[in-house]
Amino acid sequence: MTLRRFSAVLLVSACILTVSAQQTGDLQQATSQLAASVYTGPSMKTLRDLTDGIGGRLSGSPAHNRAAEWAQEQFRAAGVPNVHFESFTIANGWVRGTAHAEMLAPFARTLHIDSLGWAPSTPAGGVKGELFGVNDLALDSLKPHAGQIKGKIVLLDTTRIFADGFAKVMPLLDPAYEFFQQNGVQAIIFPDRELSNVRNAHSADWGAKLNPLPAGELGMEDAKLVRRLLEQGPVTIQYEADNKTAGPTSVRNVIAEIRGSDRPDEWILIGAHLDSWDFATGAQDNGTGSVSVIEVARALAALGKPLRRSVRFALWGGEEQGLLGSYAYTQAHLKEMEKCVAVLNTDNGAGHPKGWKVEDRKDLRDAMQPLSDSLLKDIGGGDLSMEVTYDTDHGPFMLQGIPALDLWVDMSHYGEIHHKASDTFDKVAPVDFKAGEAIVAVTAYAIAQQEKPISPHISHEEVAEIIKKAGLTEMLTLVGQWKP
């Protein structure tokens, strides 16, 4: 056995002994109290107040502003008076209006369509033109068609274009949109992928950038119909959308804190995004996550004794436009990042919980294993996943080398509600929801109380290896959230 390996074994063994010793006393008592508090707590009522009372919460919209003010009062009512807003600016504000489309030829038919997020309105009365199919956004593929697309409405073959994932296509988007605009395209149509012409709310790019052209999201069956008709001859449609757009717009993050007793300058962060899309009321994306943060804050405050380290609670804006709020926070607090011991994020719906994703960090997995075995296994959260994702707000902290935990739940039915009109309060299973809250509360308490940080920060070079392995380097560099 090498000296390095022997040292690692000693470190893991020491962690196990530390957890075991704590578990016999205060730790076991406190975590049991936390779990019980969460299971009997008011989070279902809180969630209903948010989703049914405020509804969908697009970043920068009046609804999101109301939600931020509501969340501030919820933290105060939960016994956490130290709460404030930290604002950041997104490139453009956007609020959805109405959208309508019809196929005019070869026969008349109303189409199922909505505007893409952050797409502008059409001219009054809409646009009318023949469809032109595009299955590759690379400029070399588009340039031969420059003379054919003037006055047309482009129909993208999204199945082929996004076959290798959004990250692979991102470098092509802005040049392609500019090409379409310069060559007289009137609008862009994005077919959806769901049965029964159901649409998924999303935007056509990253960063709350306003698309240069009107863009509509067409139901899958309608899109397949017009594509089949295109094989036989011209297809003409009319598309009209009326959205409210604005320039740079201020968005609020909601930040609360319970100061630690022994090491107040060291802190863990428990976060979720408060913003949502607007087809529904954002119940599981991410009302459940946001309410979980508030509920864990309430349960920790109810213990009546500060934890060893400080605990910060964050409800982010701008997640749906590219993790903008959490990234802005890391940049505003760069000098403090070295004191951040861990980040716990919850934003994968309220499915049956499994445990935590540790973002391909073997050191973090090994450090978490004693906690998972001794404290989380019996409440349904004992598993650890090495999967790397950059699809929610743990991501910007992961890039700083901070131990980042993303709540791992069963997502086998998440696609049925994600970004759809079905993401409503009635789809939330209370027991699974509360089990996830209990896992977050117990994990946060254990990490905040440990004598040593759960795991060290890793270097820029080590983070680079993780995101390279996950195929994320080019995308994160392109959007400006990573510097190689």
Image (cartoon, rainbow, N blue to C red):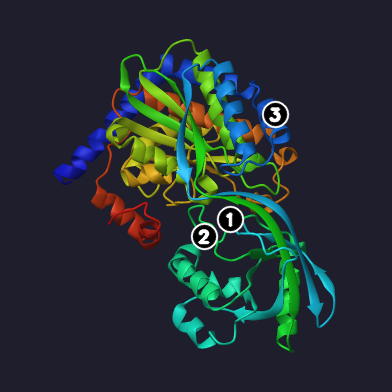
Q: Is residue 50 above or below residue 470?
A: above
Lower position in the chain sequence, tag 1 or tag 3: 3
Query: Label 1, label 3: how many angstroms apart (C-alpha)?
Result: 27 Å
Percent x, y of residue 381: 52, 36
Q: Is residue 187 above or below residue 62?
A: below
Q: What residue is disc 1 on?
A: 118
Q: Is residue 88 left or right of residue 98?
A: left
Q: Residues within 10 Å of mark 3 (few under 14, many from 20)?
A: some
Q: Is residue 32 left or right of residue 350?
A: left
Lower position in the chain sequence, tag 1 or tag 2: 1
Secondary element at tag 3: helix
Q: Is residue 324 left or right of residue 287?
A: left
The reply to whether callout 3 and callout 2 are in contact (CB within 8 Å) is no
* Snapshot quadrant of residue 444: top left
Residue sitting nearer the eye, 77 or 58: 58
Q: Residue at x 41, y 35 (%)?
A: 343
Secondary element at tag 1: loop
Q: Residue at x 54, y 72 (%)?
A: 181
The reply to whether callout 1 and callout 3 are in contact (CB within 8 Å) is no
Residue type at numbered disc 3:
Asp
Q: Residue at x 46, y 65 (%)?
A: 170
The reply to whether callout 1 and callout 2 are in contact (CB within 8 Å) is yes
Q: What residue is disc 2 on?
A: 205
Q: What residue is disc 3 on?
A: 49
Residue type at numbered disc 2:
Asp
